[in-house]
Image (spheres, helix red, strand yellow):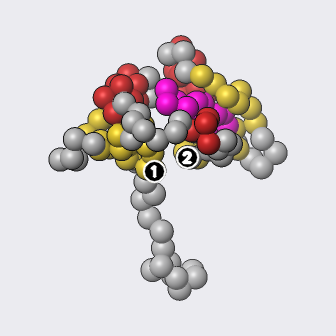
Amino acid sequence: MNPASGAVALARPRFVIAVPDLARSAAWYRDVLGFEIHDVGDPGWRWFQRDACVILAGACPDAPPPAAIGDHAYFAYIEVDGIDAFHAELVVRGVDILKPLRDEPWGMREFAIRTLDGHRMMFGEEIG
């Protein structure tokens, strides 16, 4: 329970994505974004974890790619401690940067990427 509102509190968000080639995607998240890859006991699923961020990936070879469905939203907004260093790390690894690193008027320093499979992710850190 959330004592401030008396409502049920949300905790430990997880993201779920469909990928066409699970092994290829897992290798990219491991080698490029620095996630650990975990088996879940089902050959069609893996979970990718880096610190508190968890992404559940399911093999969906017949699903349309994110760009084909006209999805202009980001599937994740992940807060980062040390955004400048993280951004530099991804640039060196050749990640497709969709939105350059910049300070925003809403008090976040942020940037966006496109994953190997075409999913979009935003990373941000509070300014100040």
Q: Which residue is mark 1?
A: 15
> In this view of the protein, which residue sits in the foreground, 4 or 78?
78
Whether pointer 2 and pointer 1 mark residues with C-beta atoms closer than 8 Å, the reply is yes
What amino acid type is highlighted by mark number 2? Answer: Ala
Which numbered disc flags the more N-terminal residue, 2 or 1?
1
Please report the bounds of the magenta region as a residue range: 110-122
Secondary structure character of the magenta stretch overall: strand
- At numbered mark 1, what does the secondary structure look like: helix, strand or loop? strand
> In this view of the protein, which residue sits in the foreground, 90 or 48?
48
How many numbered marks have been drawn onto this rendered protein structure?
Answer: 2
- At numbered mark 2, what does the secondary structure look like: helix, strand or loop? strand
Quarter of the picture holding the C terminus: top right
**Residue 47 horizontal/vertical position (percent):** 32, 43
- Tell me where residue 38 sits by quadrant: top left
Label 2 neighbourhood size at 10 Å, few (<14), some (14-19), many (20+)? some
On the question of residue 30 being in view, the answer is: no
Say if 100 sits above or below 66 in the image.
above
Furthest toward the bottom, the residue is 6
Quarter of the picture holding the N terminus: bottom left
Q: Which residue is mark 2?
A: 76
What amino acid type is highlighted by mark number 1? Answer: Phe
